[in-house]
Image (cartoon, rainbow, N blue to C red):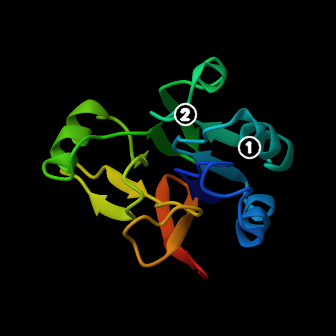
Amino acid sequence: MQVLLLADTHVPNRARDLPAEVWSAVEAADTVIHAGDWVDATLLDALESRAARLIGVYGNNDGPPLRARLPEVAEAELDGVRVAVVHETGPAAGREQRCAARYSGRDLLVFGHSHIPWDTVAPGGLRLLNPGSPTDRRRQPHCTYMTATLARGSINDVLLHRLPR
């Protein structure tokens, strides 16, 4: 199963739309996961119409229209991988331990908020992935997103994709 990971798109505040490369990745993915900070429901509508499957949560910049349609935490099982999605996980220091305790029994936690790509494994084996942002790089050298392959309970081929400036 091919999975696309997005977060912190901030459309239309930081960009008018997602980059064309990201839309191509949406169409190629079996599942799109968005870890919050959409800003406007228009992007949610567009992703729902173009993605084969969409799993999303709201973030701190998402107002009542998005919060009415999205949960704070989403959970799914994708080809045997137990996935949780949340926007914010708190400070980087101690993140693995906090998340391992809060999301025990899961294999993968996808999160956002910082716009900083992250890929670590917590005690007990929980994989933590933050795809960064495809539209707002902040202090990062590039805007980014991630892809991964989930198969028979394992997380494979996690790739961080850098978008051209």
Query: Label 2: few (<14), some or many (≥20) within 10 Å?
Result: many
Residue at 50% from the left image edge and 35% from the top image edge: 61
Indicate the position of residue 128 as horizontal and vertical percent values.
35, 53
Badge 1 marks a residue whose secondary structure is helix
The residue that disc 1 covers is: 43
Outermost residue on the right side: it is 49
Q: Nearer the viewer, residue 36 or 128?
A: 36
Query: Label 1: few (<14), some or many (≥20) within 10 Å?
Result: some
Indicate the position of residue 149 as horizontal and vertical percent values.
58, 64
Amino acid at pointer 1: Leu
Residue at 79% from the left image edge and 49% from the top image edge: 51
Residue 64, quarter of the rendered image: top right
Say which label, 1 or 2, has the lower sequence index. Answer: 1
Quarter placement of the C terminus = bottom right
Q: Nearer the viewer, residue 125 or 87?
A: 87
Amino acid at pointer 2: Val
Q: Nearer the viewer, residue 12 or 153?
A: 12
Q: CA distance from mark 1 to mark 2?
A: 13 Å
Residue 41, quarter of the rendered image: top right
Q: Is residue 40 above or below residue 165?
A: above
Q: Is residue 27 left or right of residue 14?
A: right
The residue that disc 2 covers is: 57
